[in-house]
Image (cartoon, grey):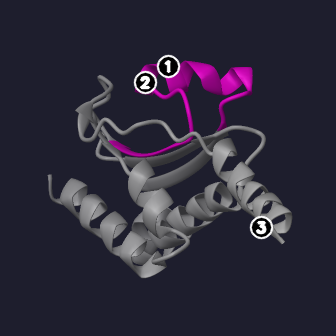
Amino acid sequence: MKTFRLLLGIVLFIPLLACNAQSPKKDVKASDNNSDKIEAYYFHFTARCVTCRTIEARAKENLETLYPNQFKQGLITFQSLNLEEASNKPLAEKLGVSGQTLLIVKGDQKINLTNEGFMYAVAKPEKFKEIINEKVDGLLIK
């Protein structure tokens, strides 16, 4: 019975090792782009756990439902970018990303929501939606 519990614990723990989220650097100055456009980026690797996929899906869904007009007009965008693809590396370097990261970017402002995504996207999706709403609303006012 102890062996079974040990094996079960290992099997449940291994997927967490695959998610090595980048530590956040909240509200850091990023680019020299002074646009009114809000761009959401979810950077990930090819191998992804359920939580990583859920963060991506919920972030995109939340932006589409909270800001349908801005999303349709292209004033708010969402991109999922694989860090292992060479074409995505220049943007990742420009934004200072090296691991799974959820960023909201407007002009020279960056908001890192990676920790919030890992904490709430699966367990408390409404809380995750509230956080996205609060952060994006703050960018729309500026």
User: Nearer the observer, disc 2 or disc 3?
Assistant: 3
Q: Is residue 22 above or below residue 69?
A: above
Name the residue carrying label 1.
Answer: 93
Q: In the image, is 69 to the left or to the right of 28? A: right
* Residue at 24% across, 40% down: 27
Q: In the image, is 141 to the left or to the right of 59? A: left
- The amino acid type, in three-letter code, at marker 3 is Arg
* 140 vs 116, nearest the viewer: 116
- The amino acid type, in three-letter code, at marker 2 is Gly
User: Nearer the observer, disc 3 or disc 1?
Assistant: 3
Residue 96 bears which disc, if any?
Answer: 2
Disc 2 element: loop
- State how many labels appear: 3
For the residues labelled 2 and 3, the Cα–Cα distance comes to 40 Å
Residue extending farthest left? 142
* 126 vs 51, nearest the viewer: 51
Disc 1 element: helix
Name the residue carrying label 3.
Answer: 5
Q: Is residue 111 above or below residue 117?
A: above
For the residues labelled 1 and 2, the Cα–Cα distance comes to 5 Å
Q: Counting other residues with Cα less than 10 Å from the Cα at mark 2, is it few (<14), some (14-19), or many (20 or more)?
A: few
* Residue at 44% across, 21% down: 94
Q: Which residues are magenta?
A: 82-105
Which label's residue is closer to the chain start, 2 or 3?
3
For the residues labelled 3 and 1, the Cα–Cα distance comes to 42 Å
**Percent from the top left, x then y, of residue 12?**
73, 61
- The amino acid type, in three-letter code, at marker 1 is Glu
Q: Counting other residues with Cα less than 10 Å from the Cα at mark 1, is it few (<14), some (14-19), or many (20 or more)?
A: few
